[in-house]
Amino acid sequence: MRSSVCAPPSLLFLLLFFIFFLGRQHHIAARLSWLRLLMSFCLWTDALKVMASHQHFHPHSIKIPGDITLGGLFPIHARGPHGLPCGELKKEKGIHRMEAMLYALDQINSDPELLPNITLGARILDTCSRDTYALEQSLTFVQALIQKDTSDIRCSNGEPPVIRKPERVVAVVGASASSVSIMVANILRLFEIPQVSYASTAPELSDNNRYDFFSRVVPPDSYQAQAMLDIVKALGWNYVSTLASEGNYGESGVDAFMQISREAGGVCIAQSVKIPREPTDGEFDKIIKRLMETSNARGVIIFANEDDIKQVLEAARRANLTGHFLFVGSDSWGAKSSPIMELEDVAEGAVTILPKRASIDGQERIGLDSSYEQEGKVQFVIDAVYAVAYALHSMQQNLCSAASGVCSNMDPVEGRALLDYIRAVNFNGSAGTSVLFNENGDAPGRYDIFQFQMTNHSHPGYHVIGQWTNNLRLNLEEMQWSGGDKSLPDSICSFPCKPGERKKMVKGVPCCWHCELCDGYQYQLDEFTCEICPSDMRPVPNRTACRPTPIIKLEWNSPWALVPAALSMLGILATSTVVITFIRFNDTPIVRAAGRELSYVLLTGIFLIYLITFLMIAEPGVVVCAFRRLLLGLGMAITYSAMLTKTNRIYRIFEQGKRSVTPPKFISPTSQLLITFILISVQVFGVFVWFAVVPPHTIVDYDELRPPNPDLARGILKCDMSDLSLICCLSYSIVLMVTCTVYAVKSRKVPETFNEAKPIGFTMYTTCIVWLAFVPIFFGTAQSTEKMFIQTATLTVSMTLSASVSLGMLYIPKVYVILFHPEQNIPKRKRSFKGVVQAAHLSHKSFKEKQNGKTNFEPE
């Protein structure tokens, strides 16, 4: 039976406790392993007596003899408090993993096909979860390779001393923590001793130049970090914090996660917090407070040891933040119950990752009544031992040919050659998955994704919700969060902007932004840009695109059209009545006295003024626009040209009569018509020049009705007549109007016999008042949303009023006399006695005025 130099009483007591329950266990190999372990403690008392003098004694170690010895490093104890190297016993990470190595050695040594006639032994050391202590312990592995000069050493009787040669360790299985593996790897590589870890995942160990003798059967944290990043993205998070225990494992894991997230983009780190190796009182409360500085970052990526994880959860509970933080834990959390014990409500919903594993049948629960379940890295411990065994088997087959056992070519085992054989292994591991290494000694990344669930589940605890093998497969439907909530929680810096809002990025934080509304006539071009819609378009209600602006025109059923049209229709009827009456009584004294030729010209102008209202309301087109240009100023030009000719004739006759009895020139009807047509031709010529320079056409004016609210924007279909061109078109008529008014003022003292002078004067005074009121109304509505309607109505009504004033003052009284007092519309010879007397009086007055040197002429 194998012997051992033993460990402290606490470990011995635990082993005896396990042996007690082993009697109920039916697996022989496991029972034999525990029996061997028990015998390794039987010499504990004797070892204590010689501890001071025995140079090969190392506390917390197990030795199993064999033809070839493997080293083993396990955290049997936790880190000691207050400067002590070792603390309390670690049942899961320590005892369970160590037993897995003993179990694997038993399996290999009992396998006739693997390493036949070769027994594997072991030297297993306790690292006490401390890298410096582990380094001291691991010096045991290199003692056999150190040449010692004993020529000067003699016993008391003069004989040379008998020094027991330490066993030669060909490879080391371990360590667990990355910080310990890094420390040990630095010394093992100096002596070319291969190292195969079952739990160290720090990305730093993938550096084949610095850690060329290091290999591992677990994937590095770079794979784990990628898997965790994929989980974060699958959950729709883009703003998370990181939390790491000080040391290689935690810091390297977080560094890998941050680097991968930067390269991939889409995820920002809100806080990156480090847990000190020796945390002070209140340290974890400060950590929680710091994490809450970015409270939107609910997701916390945690690379920490079990003790730190537990204290983080406790601090979150003390801060009354149960359910706030959404933890994504690395394999150091995995599916362990110890970090969350009595903190299940705080840990609920935590997503954890663990290299893909399987329960090993030979390592099942100890005792039917025991609550113990197999630790997660047991599988990898066994795989690590088998990886070395298969490498030794291949080396033995190649170096020893047909010889069995360890041949001279393998004595001693050359470390560099064994490393090459280790890197070349490829076999099905204890979980049924292949065990192999890449050029850096890393195993492929295969992970199970767990979530800790407590609510609405028949079996509360960790549940597999997905896998990761180079890509993520996550079952979101099976996930549930604090309180059993099935909806995915948020961990984002800024919520998505609403449609029609652009992102204004926060400088230096690509995942944070402010949402700004695309206002006015802007629409959302992309998530960062607002653009103004083209002039003929306006944004849709949600401002994600542009839509055509509706095109409007003045409709006949609009009040702005009905009132002017009704007035113009009445004017046309009145004008037609006057014309018909004048034609019917063309040779009567009143019609002749009114100046028949110019009256018909003037009535034509008045008729055109009324007619222009319908052209201004009609739907714009090329023909309509052409007639608008022509008739807008022509009607007024005809009207006021005729009036100007009349007033000028009266004024010249009156002024000439003051000087001589000779009548002035150009007062005949033909001359009057010629003068009138010359004045009208100026307007017509200007219009035709306008036609030649700018042919009439329609436009859609999108600027006129473009209020701040784009929903009210309209395009107006109109003729190409701006306000300026409209005023220019009317300007000549206004000049005629003003000139006519001046002559009317000068002719205000004309004798009563010149019965046309005063009505023309009243007409021009009233017309001037109408057009003076038109100007402020027309231009004062330029900013109104109904500018086009108001201006069109104002213009047409003003023109209708001016035409009506002319018609009413000059012709309605005459028509009234003609129709209702025909006795007054007869030649002088047929007049009544009273009329004769009046004519005689006028003749006498005329004679007296003639004697005074004055000549008076009666109108026609």
Image: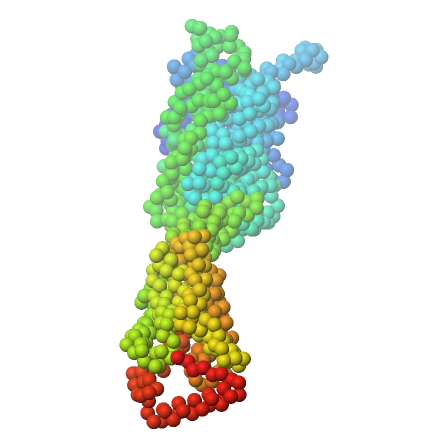
Task: Inspect this view and state whether residue 616 appears.
Answer: yes
Which residue ends up furthest to the left in the rendered image?
584
Residue 844 shown left or right of residue 590 in the figure: right
The image shows residue 607, relative to residue 295, as above or below, that is below
Which residue ends up furthest to the right in the rendered image?
152
Q: In which quarter of the image is the C terminus?
A: bottom left
Residue 604 shown left or right of residue 180 in the figure: left
The image shows residue 453, relative to residue 175, as above or below, that is below
Name the residue: 34% across, 46% down.
457
Residue 209: give x, y in percent of width and height.
57, 22
Instruction: Choose between 564 and 782: the one closer to the eye.
Output: 564
Instruction: Choose between 85 and 425: the one closer to the eye.
Output: 425
Name the residue: 44% across, 67% down.
675
The image shows residue 332, relative to residue 419, as above or below, that is below
The image shows residue 464, relative to residue 585, as above or below, that is above
Instruction: Choose between 541 and 787: the one closer to the eye.
Output: 787
Which residue ends up furthest to the top in the rendered image?
402
Q: How many labels does the image show?
A: 0
Q: In which quarter of the image is residue 371?
A: top left
Name the residue: 36% across, 55% down.
622
Name the residue: 34% across, 57% down.
623
Residue 646: give x, y in percent of width and height.
44, 74
Task: Inspect this view and state whether residue 538 appears.
Answer: no
Residue 60: give x, y in percent of width and height.
56, 29
The colour scheme used here is: rainbow
